[in-house]
Amino acid sequence: MHALLTAHLARHHGLVATSQLPDVGLTRHQFEWLVGQRELVRIHRGVYRHAAVPVTLELRVRAGLLAVGDRGVLSHRAAIARHGVRNFSCALVEVTHRGSSWPTHEGLTVHRSRVLASPDYARKDGVWTTTPARSLIDVAGQLPPTLVARWAQQWIADRKVRLDDIAAAAGRAGNHPGARRLRPHLDELLADVDSTGEAVLGRILAAAGIPPELHVLVTTATGHTFELDWAYPEARLGLEMDGYGVHLRSAAAFDDDRWRRNELEIAGWTILNFTSRQCRRPTRVVDQVIRARAVSRTPD
C-alpha cells in the first residue's frame, strides 16, 4: 500500500476520506483500485476504513464525524455516553452539524444548529463533543427531563459540571426545546444538590478512593421502594445525608424517616447517617464508611 496512505491510516484510526486523497498522494484511479481489491471498505459516502480495522463504536463515531465534515460535533445521547453517566450506554452515533445544511448519512443521526456556540463544545478524548452542560440540554429534548436532571446531579457531585454552567448553556441555547424543558428543573437541581451536602459526601469518599453509587433505588420484599442518597449496593451499605430542615420538618416526616430506616434494616441494609457539619471532618467520615463496609452483610 502507498506509504503516505499507510501513515495516514495509522494516525487516523484506520480511516480515510475521499477529500483527503491529495494529502495521501493517491489518484482517483489508485483509490478505486484499493476499493476494488477490498483493502478499503466504505463506511459512509466518501469515508472508508482499512479492511483490517475492526468496526468498533469508536471507529463509527470518528467515521461519522469525518462524513459530516469539520463542522460536525458529537452530541445528544452519544455525547452523554462519551462523557460517562452510570447505567447508560449508547450505540447510536449522534452528531450536530454547525450550519444551515443538514447532511444525511445512513447509520448517523444528524441534528442541525446555527447557534451552537464555541463554549458549548470541546475535544473529548480527541473528538469534538458538546460539553457536559450542552449535552444535558440537548438530551432534555429527547428524554424525560427528570432523568436528565438526575444525570446533572450526578455530574455536579462528580465535579464534571457546575449548575451555573448548565444555566449559562441554557441561556445560549435560547428557544431550544431541551432548554425549555430543563429550565423548570434548575431550581430543583439547586435545592437537591442539599444536595450540596450530598455532593460534599461524594467528593470526600471519591477522594479517599471509595466512590459510592449516587441515588440507589432499593425495593424490599414488602414492595416498598426507597432511594438512598449514596450506597455501596454490593455490601448493602447505604449512606444518608441528614439536614435539619429536611429531615426534621415535622413529627410525621421524622416518623416516616424512622419507619423507612427500619424497613431497610429488615431488608438487610446497614444505614449510616451524616450531616454537613460531620463532613467538615472527612477523616472521621471515611473511617466510619471503611469500617462499615468491612462488616456489612453481603447480598444473598
Image (cartoon, rainbow, N blue to C red):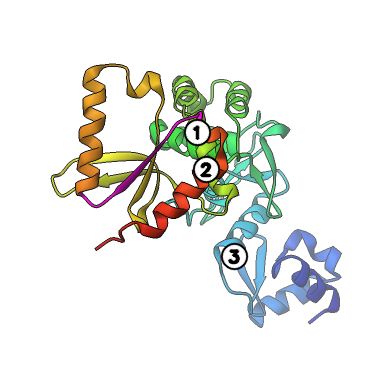
Residue 223 against residue 138 in the figure, above or below: below
Callout 3–callout 1 Cβ contact below 8 Å = no
- In the drawing, what numbered circle is on residue 43? 3
Residue at 77% in and 67% down: 11
Amino acid on which the number 3 mark rests in the picture: Ile
Left or right of 102, for residue 196 = left
- In the drawing, what numbered circle is on residue 171? none
Amino acid on which the number 2 mark rests in the picture: Arg
- Label 3: few (<14), some or many (≥20) within 10 Å? many
Amino acid on which the number 1 mark rests in the picture: Gln
Residue 44 against residue 181 in the figure, above or below: below
Residue at 82% in and 79% down: 2
Asked whether 191 falls inside the magenta stretch, the response is no
**Can you say which quadrant of the picture contains the N terminus?**
bottom right
Question: Mark 2 vs mark 3: which is more N-terminal?
Answer: 3
Asked whether 275 falls inside the magenta stretch, the response is yes
Q: Which residue is mark 1?
A: 278
Question: Mark 3 vs mark 1: which is more N-terminal?
Answer: 3
**Can you say which quadrant of the picture contains the C terminus?**
bottom left
Q: Which residue is mark 2?
A: 284
Magenta residues span 267-277
Disc 2 from disc 3: Cα separation: 55 Å
Residue at 61% in and 33% down: 113
